Amino acid sequence: MYTSAPTDKPAAKAWTVPMLADAKRDGRKLVMLTAYDASFARTMDAVGIELVLVGDSLGMVVQGQNSTLPVTTADMAYHTACVARGLSKALLISDLPFQSDATPERALDAATQLLQAGAAMVKLEGAGHKLEVIRFLVEREIPVCAHLGLTPQSVLRLGGYKLQGRDDATAAKLRADARAVAEAGATLLVLECVPTGLAAAITADLAIPTIGIGAGPQCDGQVLVLHDLLGVNSGHRRPKFVKDFLAESGSVAGAFQAYADAVRSGAFPDAAHSYD
Ligand code: KIV
């Protein structure tokens, strides 16, 4: 029979959805990374990364596509199930891929598949008609993470992967959208590629935590794509906010730990990895 060895250390608690708002209230930074398989997920879990995201970035960094648009719900469910097998403490979030959230009913079907594969929350991009989708999912017991700023599923309309909210009008719109997704019931908000000051204002406006990627140090947490953090060339342009933590750590677990420490201490992202 197998028993666990006695230890002085209390076992870390598994992260739950209500703990995210507690972390913001207590001023504790949240650390998020993307993962697509069980082995990297297990390493993230072991170093105490709180949030693991199966991003639809898998289209670009795993499948070798030019955008996230070709990713399907079946792809997301497969990788979500793989990652779930590697986690025991981190909270698992999974992206609703392109157009799987075009209507509330479609979103409910896709989100159900992702939760049944092991996710505890789904992430979706945008506000506007997505507010109805967020309300519909939350009323049906599906926790939602919203995603604003640079929303990669909008790449055709945006004409590329560019900084968002640069002028007063677009900044005011982003700020209003952030309030609206929180009011619709989102539990978490990813802010991608927005100026530091705007992300700080949105973070101060909301009771729910913001997770930044290219959004400056004043968000309530940070996320990076696994391949970017490890300096793996996925064939795409490296944005300014990306930092290779493997180069200075020498091991994958060391890179995850260095990233987590830098986020928790406020050292990452610095001005060189943020936008004015
Ligand atoms: O798909 C993804 O990996 C994401 C992160 C960049 C936030 O949405």
Image (cartoon, helix red, strand yellow):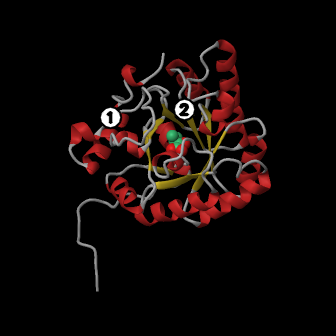
Does the residue tagged 1 have its C-beta within 8 Å of any atom of ligand 1?
A: no
- Foreground pick, 227 / 40: 227
SS of the residue at dot 2? strand
- Foreground pick, 62 / 250: 62
The residue depicted at 39 percent of the width and 49 percent of the height is 49
SS of the residue at dot 1? helix
Q: Earlier in the sequence, mark 2 or mark 1?
A: 2
**Quadrant of residue 191 in the image?**
top right
Check disc 2: other Cα within 10 Å, few if <14, some if 14-19, many if 20+: many
176 sits to left or right of 259: right
The label shown at residue 192 is 2
Foreground: disc 2 or disc 1: 2
The residue at which mark 1 appears reads as: 262
Q: Position of residue 109 (x, y in %)?
A: 72, 61
- Foreground pick, 29 / 159: 159
The residue depicted at 48 percent of the width and 29 percent of the height is 214
Tag 1: amino acid = Ala
Question: Which corner quadrant holds the N terminus?
Answer: bottom left
85 sits to left or right of 160: left
Q: Measure the C-alpha gap from mark 2 to mark 1.
A: 19 Å
The residue depicted at 57 percent of the width and 57 percent of the height is 76
Q: Position of residue 215 (x, y in %)?
A: 50, 27
